[in-house]
Every structure is written in C-alpha cells, then in structure tokens.
C-alpha cells in the first residue's frame, strides 16, 4: 500500500473549514470566560470592602461618652475604632470594644467585614487573606490541570473546572462563617485557573496558526469590560452575598454552552483513539457545513484517480486502498505515520501565529524534541543558557503580578468613590490591550517592556512625594488617582511583551504548553503567582508605614526594567528549538550590540504576533 501523508493535523481543519461555526463558538466561549471570570478574582474589592468604623456606644450612653476621640492619619479627631471607655464618665481608662462596631454606610453595604466583624483584633487582614488564598488556589490549579487534561482530555477538564467553579461560587454565597468562606475561595481559585489554562489550550487546538492569534487576543478584550461591569454591579448591589450570586450566575448558565463543545481532535490523535477521531471528523464536518464523500464514492475515486491527499471523512491519507480496507485502519495508518514524524504531539506546543512560518523546521525535528518528553523536566530550565532566561522571566512575571494586583486592589484606598475608581482602573486597560498588538510588532520587545516598567515605576515614585493636601489647602487626590491610572496602563501594556518573550525565548521543548508539566512558562507562571499572592499583604503594610506599598511596587518595577534588558531582543528572530539555538541567539545579539547594529527598532516585525 502506497501511503501519502498529509503535512499536519491543521490540514484536516483546513478542509473542514478552518474558521467555521465551531471555531466561532470557541471564541464565544473564550470571550464568555474572559468577561465573567475576572469578576471573581477581583470581587474582593467590594465583597471585602472595609468602610470607616468605630466602636459602638454602650447601652445607656452617648457615643462621645462611650468612645474616646483619637487622631487619624490626617490629624483629624475621629472616634476610636478599637477602644472604648471602661467606665464612661468616671475614668479615661480604655479597653477593647465590647459592644461591637458601627460601620459607615457611605460607600459599602453588607460585606464580609461588616457581617463577621473582621476588624481590630478579630482579623484585620481578612480581605487581604481572602484574596491571597484565591491566588494560592490558582497556583495549585495551574500545577495540576496539565496532568488532568493530558490524561482525561481537554473537554472533561474544562467541564469539570466549570462545575467546580460554579459549586464553590454558589457555596460562597451561603458561607456561614469566615473559615468556610476561605475554604471555598481556595477551591474557587483552583477551578478558575484550571479553566483558564485548560481552555486556552483546548481552544487553540482547534485553530490553525493563521487564526490562532486573533482567536486568543480578541476575546481577551472582554477581561476589562467584565471588570467595568463588576464595578456597576457592586454599585447597584450592596449585599455581598447577592453580589457574589450575580457574579457566579452567568457561569452557571453558560455551562450548557461548554457542554456542546467536542473533545480536542489533537488530543484524540495523540491518544490513538481511532474510532473517536473518525466520528469526530464526521461531526466537525456537519457543524461547519462541509459535505463529506461517502465510502462508496471514495473507493470508486480511489480506483480511477491517482493517489491524492484527503484530510476529511475520517481519512487523513488516501492511497488507492483495497476495497475491504476500513476507515479505522486508514486512520490508524495515518496516526502512526504522523506519530513517526512527531506531528501529533507538536500541536500541543503551538501557541503563536508565526509557527506557520516555521513549519518546515518543526516538521524536521525528532519526535523526542517536539513533545513533552519524560527526559525533559524542570531541571532543564536550570541549565545555561536557559537558566538566565528562566530567572529573568520569573522576575518579570513576579513584578507584573505584584504590581498589577497592587493597582487593582488599591482602588478602594484612593480618594473619592471606590466604584468609580475601580471602573476607571479597568477602563485604562482597554487601550493598553488594543495597542499591544500594534506596538510590539513595531518596536523592540525588551526596550518596550523596559519603557513600560520604568514609566510605571516613575509614576509610583512621584506619588510618594505628593501630599494629599498642600499647606495651602489644595487637594491633590485627583492627581494621585490619575498617576495611579497611568501606572496601571503601563503595567498592563508590559504584559504582552513579557508573554512574547516567553514564547520567543524558551526553546520549543520547554516553551509555553499549559498542558505540559515540563514547560518554562509553567514554572514562571507558578513563580509569578507568588507576586499575586503577596500583593494584598504589601498593601496592608501601609497601615504600618505610610506609602510602603508604593515604594515596594516602584522598586520592583525598576528591578524588572533592569532585568529585561539582559535578555536578547526577539524581534525578527527564529524561535529557538533547543538550548543551542537559544545560546546562538543570545551570542548574536551581544555581538550586534557591541558593533552598534541594533538600531532597528522602527523596522517592521515579522515575528510572533499577538
């Protein structure tokens, strides 16, 4: 039997309509996730909002008789938050509040802070801990989802994550106490990150390189719009339980949309599930409106025509087969042939648009170099020259996560309306996300990331030296808010460049594969999550030392800016397939720098596209 092999699984998708109804539905589901799920990760701004408060008056006494006056940070006299008189009217001795607390209704209604009195010695960092536990769950979920999705499939992983997310989210609405709330927040974090990571790969595996980039970036705009909607919902719903219900309900309803998604064709091929592949190809053709030839027609054509490639009807190979040869055997032959070339595993590695340009190089690699080999592990990330890239990328992700969430979680601390501040904070992300695909194609990645982080750090530094009110009585809080928004814009803009450096510097066998445990991006993502975990507590340090959080965020921004300049710029370079390729790229860039040949920042980029 003469076998003619197709080039890749992408050829199957091309013949089945590469951007048909199925791909559009994947984009809709991706947009749905990116619109609603960020609400959960940043809802603590409102469900954990801490209003102004003071000790409640003793029964039979007026407030000024029960609670002493103390100076706040601005030097104004206010009622004490945590102390009351032991014997009102007869002694100035004080004790901890014994009659509960009174909360200001100016901005917040019922929150976890007011319901469970998580103030003073009860748990002063309750909201910060609730945000950190969510991020810890996210880090745990990101580490385990690869194993689950690779073993049981993409579809069950996503559906399981959505189910767990809905159950934990609904459970939070009915939490009887803070401990239960924290456990459910952890589970919610696990499921949230599992959905993010698994669906990213799941969706990309149904996209050919030509459409993969836009399929990933267009729905991402929904992230910022979702946060803007969160501020509106929080403004209208002042009970944290009902707000949580409003946040989780869309995913409960949207579960049925995910149910109709088929299993990944690439995953089925990698697992040699022949019959499932055959049925799935027929199903995909029907969904995308492609009419497949019947078995009789194919056999007739096979006898009268020269062998030619067909990537549909359950056949990725046609070669004048005997009439008694079944579809299953043909698919088996194809799967085996493709496995010999390492092609079926390759697609778990593809994540960027210009992979298409490098197909020939990829296809010539040995199978062991293109898949998540058991011989490749995290220790490969600790060997030169990959070690240098691993360290710098981990620092960059740490800086981004810490500074981004520092801005996102501090909107309630800014002067003015916290709902408006949060809305504006989300709004400035939109131009940053829209500009990213344009400017990172035109300018150097490393220089632009450095510029963004320096600009962010500079804005934070200026804030440190600006008083809220001048000696002449001029209110400068608006200026502080504007500088914070500028910082948020630049740190958001840096994200795309960091992701590009990850995709273009880590060798193929260690690059971003969310479902591969042995990936540079996986390790850097886990380390970066530490930044998101500690961000809430960095903000809490302001209660001990004024502006300490701003100082730390500024220092880390400048540190990240310095570190990124130690990486070679990846614009107009071929992505490295192994450590030797990376070493060559780094060596070439150093020589160019010494010779002054790096002034190409304004030339068009032909590399990876966002």
Image (cartoon, rainbow, N blue to C red):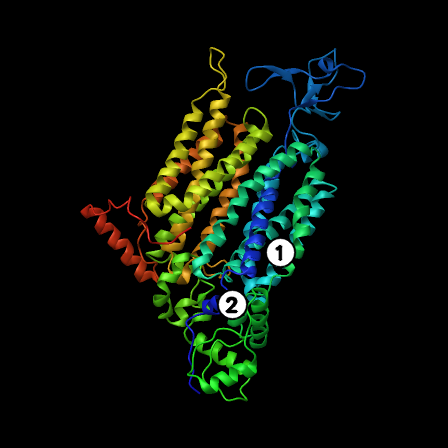
* Residue for badge 2: 16
* Residue for badge 1: 161
**Label 1 residue SS:** helix
> Residue at the spot x=47%, y=19% of the render?
467
Residue 583, image quadrant: bottom left
| CA gap, disc 1 and disc 2 | 29 Å
Residue 102 shows in this picture: yes
Q: Residues within 10 Å of mark 2 (few under 14, many from 20)?
A: many
The mark that comes first in sequence, 1 or 2, is: 2
Apparent side of residue 439 relative to residue 181 in the rendered image (left or right): left
Q: Residues within 10 Å of mark 1 (few under 14, many from 20)?
A: many
User: Residue 537: percent from the left, percent from the top?
Assistant: 54, 36
Looking at the image, residue 375 lies above or below residue 353? below
Tag nearer the camera, 1 or 2 = 2
**Callout count:** 2
- Closer-to-camera residue (256/390): 256
Residue 396, image quadrant: top left
């Amino acid at each position: 039997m003469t076998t003619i092999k197709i080039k890749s699984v992408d050829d199957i998708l091309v013949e089945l309509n590469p951007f048909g109804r199925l791909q559009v539905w994947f984009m809709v589901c991706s947009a749905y996730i990116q619109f609603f799920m960020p609400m959960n990760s940043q809802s603590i701004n409102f469900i954990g909002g801490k209003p102004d408060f003071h000790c409640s008056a003793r029964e039979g006494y007026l407030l000024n008789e029960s609670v002493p006056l103390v100076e706040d940070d601005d030097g104004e006299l206010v009622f004490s938050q945590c102390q009351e008189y032991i014997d009102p009217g007869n002694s100035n001795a004080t004790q901890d509040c014994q009659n509960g607390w009174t909360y200001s209704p100016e901005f917040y209604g019922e929150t976890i802070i007011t319901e469970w009195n998580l103030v003073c010695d009860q748990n002063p960092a309750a909201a910060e801990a609730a945000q950190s536990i969510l991020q810890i769950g996210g880090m745990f979920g990101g580490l385990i989802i690869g194993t689950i999705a690779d073993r049981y499939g993409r579809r069950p992983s996503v559906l399981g994550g959505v189910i767990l997310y809905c159950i934990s989210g609904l459970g939070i609405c009915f939490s009887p106490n803070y401990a239960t709330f924290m456990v459910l927040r952890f589970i919610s974090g696990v499921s949230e990150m599992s959905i993010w990571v698994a669906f990213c790969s799941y969706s990309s595996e149904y996209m050919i390189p030509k459409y993969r980039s836009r399929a990933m970036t267009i729905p991402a705009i929904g992230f910022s719009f979702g946060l803007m909607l969160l501020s509106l919902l929080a403004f209208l719903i002042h009970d944290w339980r009902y707000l949580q219900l409003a946040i989780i309900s869309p995913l409960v309803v949207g579960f049925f949309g995910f149910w109709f998604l088929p299993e990944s064709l690439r995953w089925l091929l990698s697992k040699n599930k022949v019959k499932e592949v055959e049925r799935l190809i027929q199903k995909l053709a029907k969904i995308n409106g492609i009419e497949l030839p019947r078995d009789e027609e194919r056999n007739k054509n096979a006898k009268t025509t020269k062998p030619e490639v067909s990537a549909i009807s359950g056949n990725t190979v046609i070669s004048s087969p005997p009439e008694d040869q079944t579809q299953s055997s043909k698919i088996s032959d194809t799967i085996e042939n493709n496995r010999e070339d390492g092609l079926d595993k390759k697609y778990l590695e593809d994540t960027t648009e210009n992979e298409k340009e490098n197909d020939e190089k990829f296809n010539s690699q040995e199978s062991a170099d293109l898949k998540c080999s058991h011989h490749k592990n995290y220790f490969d990330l600790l060997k030169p020259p990959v070690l240098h890239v691993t360290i710098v990328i981990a620092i960059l992700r740490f800086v981004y996560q810490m500074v981004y969430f520092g801005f996102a979680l501090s909107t309630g601390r800014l002067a003015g309306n916290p709902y408006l501040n949060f809305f504006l904070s989300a709004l400035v992300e939109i131009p940053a996300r829209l500009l990213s695909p344009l400017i990172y194609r035109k300018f150097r990645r490393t220089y632009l990331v450095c510029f963004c982080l320096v600009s962010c750090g500079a804005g934070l530094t200026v804030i440190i030296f600006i008083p809220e009110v001048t000696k002449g009585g001029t209110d400068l809080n608006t200026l502080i808010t504007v500088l914070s928004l500028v910082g948020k814009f630049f740190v958001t803009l840096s994200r795309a460049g960091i992701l590009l450096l990850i995709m273009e510097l880590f060798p193929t066998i260690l690059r971003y594969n969310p479902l591969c445990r042995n990936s540079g991006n996986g390790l850097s993502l886990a380390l970066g999550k530490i930044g998101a975990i500690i961000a809430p507590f960095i903000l809490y340090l302001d209660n001990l030392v004024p502006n300490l959080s701003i100082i730390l965020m500024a220092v880390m921004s400048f540190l990240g800016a310095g570190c990124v300049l130690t990486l070679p710029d990846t614009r107009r370079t071929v992505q490295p397939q192994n450590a030797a390729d990376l070493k060559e790229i780094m060596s070439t860039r150093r020589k160019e720098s010494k010779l002054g040949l790096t002034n190409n920042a304004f030339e068009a980029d032909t590399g990876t596209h966002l």
